Image (cartoon, rainbow, N blue to C red):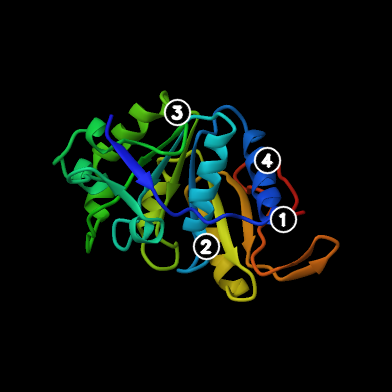
Amino acid sequence: MNELTINRIPELSYVVTEALNQLRVNLSFSGEDIKVIMITSSLPNEGKSFLSIHLWKMLADVGCTSLLIDCDLRNSRFGSRYGISGEGKVKGLAHYLSANADLEDVVYQTNIGNGFMIPNTTSIVNPAILLESPRFQKMIDSLRGEYQYILVDTPPLGSVADAMNIATHCDGNVLVIRSGETPRKVVYDSLRLLERTNKPLLGTVLNRVEISNRVGYYNRYYHYGDYYNTGSKSKRKKK
């Protein structure tokens, strides 16, 4: 298997680590059938990619074989932001979906133990045709039995329709919200969009909450809250 090296993953403070760990544990209680999880946001720069890579690493660190798929075919920043490098020409998701590579050519082992990745190395102006192709569903079906968790990082819901196409192939969704920045109306619209997919909303992550309490002051803090899924018979109230 080809290999990728992730050269820059920032160290997290104690409170952020604990909040992410709570999210990881809560997701494990979602059920054995919840394996492919889409992580999205309403707008750009809300922190979904930050959450994706750190949650993926945390799952891998506790022994879960975890795959991270970079599905932002329009404007991926994973490679530059986290210093991702590999030997020779690195092929990614767009190469597979366009039938220019086999699946085994775009799945990479990383320097994170138990951590695997399908990167995106090519920007596509209009990737809707690729995301709606049968190859996407075939990819998910093939990978589902090989990994305990598959995290799918997508473009924001409010920018393009890509995330809605991707959601139909996933088992559930996590919505990232930037505290003090994302308007409530925009969040509400995103929740309604996710309801249309008939996939459960597994939770929301409130990002960049400034707090000052017994654990001290932190500029970046993740809070995990459960929202009820209107498509499910059992509804969970927001914490």
Tell me whether circle 4 and circle 3 mark residues in contact (CB < 8 Å).
Answer: no
Q: Quadrant of residue 135?
A: top left
3D distance between C-alphas at marks 4 and 2: 19 Å
Tell me whether circle 2 and circle 3 mark residues in contact (CB < 8 Å).
Answer: no
- Label 2 crowd bin: few (<14), some (14–19), many (20+), radius 10 Å: some
3D distance between C-alphas at marks 4 and 3: 18 Å
Q: Quadrant of the C terminus?
A: bottom right
- Label 3 crowd bin: few (<14), some (14–19), many (20+), radius 10 Å: some
Number of numbered callouts drawn: 4
Is label 2 in a helix, a strand or a loop? Answer: loop
Q: Nearer the viewer, residue 14 or 184?
A: 14
Q: Earlier in the sequence, mark 2 or mark 3?
A: 2
- Label 4 crowd bin: few (<14), some (14–19), many (20+), radius 10 Å: some
Left or right: 180 as drawn, with respect to 7: right
Left or right: 178 as drawn, with respect to 210: left
Which residue carries the number 2 mark? 47
Q: Nearer the viewer, mark 4 or mark 1?
A: 1
3D distance between C-alphas at marks 4 and 1: 17 Å
Which residue carries the number 1 mark? 15
Left or right: 17 as drawn, with respect to 48: right
Q: On screen, 233 above or below 124?
A: above
Three-letter amino acid code of the residue under disc 1: Val
